[in-house]
Amino acid sequence: MARKTIHTNIAFDDVKKTYYVTLDFGVVDGKQIKKTKTTKNLSEAKQILKLHEADKVKGALQLPKKITVSEWLSDWLNNAVIPNCEKTTVHGYKNIINQISAALGNIQLQSLKPTQIQKYYTDQMTEKGLSANTVAKHHHVLSSALSFAVKQDVLFSNPCAKTTPPKKVKPEIQFYDLEQLQKLLQVCKGTPLELTIYLGAFFGLRREEIFGLMWENVDLESRKLFIKVARTIAGGETIVKGTKNQTSKRAYYIVDEIFELLKTAKEKQEQLKQLLGEEYQDSGFVVTRDDGTPYNPNYISQRFAEFIKKHDLPPLTLHGLRHSFATLGNATGISMFDISKLLGHSTMATTSNIYTHLQENLQVEQINKMANALSGKKD
């Protein structure tokens, strides 16, 4: 026999010139678990065994499991993500997992190395042309999945912790000043986009909140409007869900301009309901087509972009109306705290992080006040 034992748990094959190290993981679920590693070097074989025994003493052994990165990501998605996350989040994760699996999926999970992950990040930016922000999302998804593997005792440590993901680049915020916003409000009057634009400009609503607004949450008599539902698109599917977070559930006083638009929209829907009869679909949403069905949010976003271009206005998205609301609010003296509440942010830190330009303007004002005080000038 070519293979013979030369040391406890180490054997040598004099034909293949290979050392075989037997790693004993003990009894798991009534079965003795052992794994063999090979090397051409005796000192390396002894080192492998030494490290294994040290991990056994520390209770840091990683039980061998034959599962690939792709298989683990799929299990994590089905067992940890889908039962606990919104459909929009699941859709985003699925797309990222598909891309990770295409590059790293065939690697054994327990053999995945930080260097392989780091190369994946680099390749996605240099070869696939993905932005740093997008690759940072890939890092978040992969790291979350591997952290779950650590919790499940499939991995001893998370290899993502030893990588350096790309730094996120803060996107430039598009917003209108008062004059630009006034022009937009003027030119949109009487158009199908009027109510949508006014809700975004006067209340700073998110796109999904505008298209999730239902008549049951609008009280014209007491002039109260409640944000409770969001309606968005994920993977071509329209999803109606709760608001982004608990603080996103909020109420607004309906000012005169919005009151008149809502009243007109309600009356028009009632007239169309009578006119179309059974062909009218009473969806309960505020912003709808003439047959009562709600718009696809992506369709309105496209129409809005075309409308902006047609009227020779600076580029702006529907979400830019929300940014314009925050900027104008700050300019008119509304505190950052109150702006945060009006926008439905989870914390004021979120608001401050997004609207750094507001903080910069505030610093200019404060520094000028200090300079005037020190120089003896009056404000």
Image: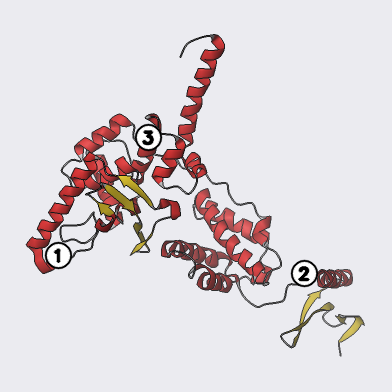
Crowdedness of circle 3 by 10 Å Cα count: few (<14), some, many (20+)? Answer: some
The residue furthest right is 6
Assign the N terminus to one quadrant of the image: bottom right
* Residue beneath disc 3: 329
- Is 181 situated left or right of 356 in this image? left
Crowdedness of circle 1 by 10 Å Cα count: few (<14), some, many (20+)? Answer: some
Of the residues tagged 3 and 1, which is closer to the observer?
3
Percent position of residue 133, x then y:
51, 49
Q: Secondary structure at mark 1?
A: loop
Of the residues tagged 3 and 2, which is closer to the observer?
3
Q: Is residue 177 above or below residue 379?
A: below
Assign the C terminus to one quadrant of the image: top left
Kind of residue at disc 1: Tyr
Q: Secondary structure at mark 2?
A: loop
* Residue beneath disc 1: 280
* Residue beneath disc 2: 60
Marks 3/1: CA–CA distance: 39 Å
Q: Residue at x 68, y 69 (%)?
A: 155
Asked whether the residues under the numbered discs 1 and 2 touch, taking CB atoms below 8 Å apart as contact, a structural biologist would say no
Give the quarter of the image for residue 22.
bottom right
Percent position of residue 312, x then y:
25, 35
Kind of residue at disc 3: Gly
Q: Residue at x 42, y 55 (%)?
A: 244
Front in this rendered view, residue 16 or 202: 202
Percent position of residue 168, x then y:
54, 46
Residue 312 seen: no
- Is 122 situated left or right of 301 in this image? right
The residue furthest left is 275
